[in-house]
Image: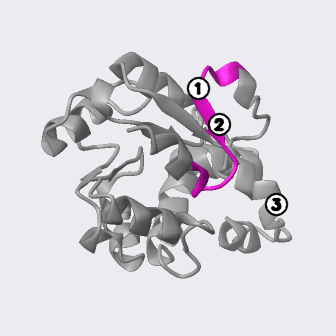
Amino acid sequence: MNRLRERRGLPALPISQLRPVASAGARGMLGAGLGMHPGDDDYETARAEFLTEYEAALDRDTRLFDGVAGCLASLAQCGLSWGIVTNKATRFTGPVVAGLGLDRLTSVVISGDTTPHAKPHPAPLFEACRRLGVAPREAVYVGDDLRDIEAARAAGMPAIAAAYGYLGATPDLDAWGADAVIATPLDLLSLLAPL
């Protein structure tokens, strides 16, 4: 976003201002960074420009949240399969997952264009469960956006809100209706212990 702003003669914005809209993708970033919204005259051109920049920098500064690597290692030690369900398009998901080394660890990756519907529709979660060979009620979905919790609810899956995630501009995790809220990735392990 800051490269787009620079081309337009605008000063860079701090990450703290852009981070809350990151999970809303190009739409959120263009709104926060350029005040552009779908339907605006130059929106589609700016969106294409943003996605080109994004694709070129997918693994430049991308890293796991603190505690995720340890959580995933513990899940593997317990013999639990896990997957990734994102609304990010496959052309972006694949390089990010591979760049983080998660492609060798995860059992399934579902992108925003894997099924005809993206979250909050339950179709991506159903597809992940189908590929894993588990019923949705036997899975748990962890997400950092209201649409994640809504998708899990629609799929009949326990939902856990990740308070360490992106969360949006004005998160009210208590209003999301998740079964639990975790402050760190490792907190997930104590919730799964009864399983």
Disc 3 crowd, CA 10 A, few/some/many (<14, 14-19, 20+): few
What residue is pinned by disc 3? 16
Q: Residue at x 60, y 65 (%)?
A: 65
Residue 64 place in picture, x, y as percent: 54, 69
Dot 2 amino acid type: Val
Compared to residue 177, the image places residue 144 above or below, namely below
**Proximity of marks 2 and 1: CB atoms separated by less than 8 Å:** yes
Residue 170 located left or right of residue 118 = right
Mark in front: 3 vs 1: 1
What residue is pinned by disc 1? 178
Q: Quadrant of residue 127?
A: top left
Residue 20 place in picture, x, y as percent: 73, 49
Label 2: which secondary element: strand
Q: Residue at x 82, y 60 (%)?
A: 16
Mark in front: 2 vs 3: 2
Label 3: which secondary element: helix
Residue 126 place in picture, x, y as percent: 25, 30
**Proximity of marks 2 and 3: CB atoms separated by less than 8 Å:** no
Dot 3 amino acid type: Ser
Compared to residue 152, the image places residue 56 above or below, namely below
What residue is pinned by disc 2? 181
Residue 7 located left or right of residue 39 = right
In three-dimensional space, the C-alpha distance between marks 2 and 3, rounded to whole angstroms, equals 22 Å
Tell me the magenta residue range: 175-187
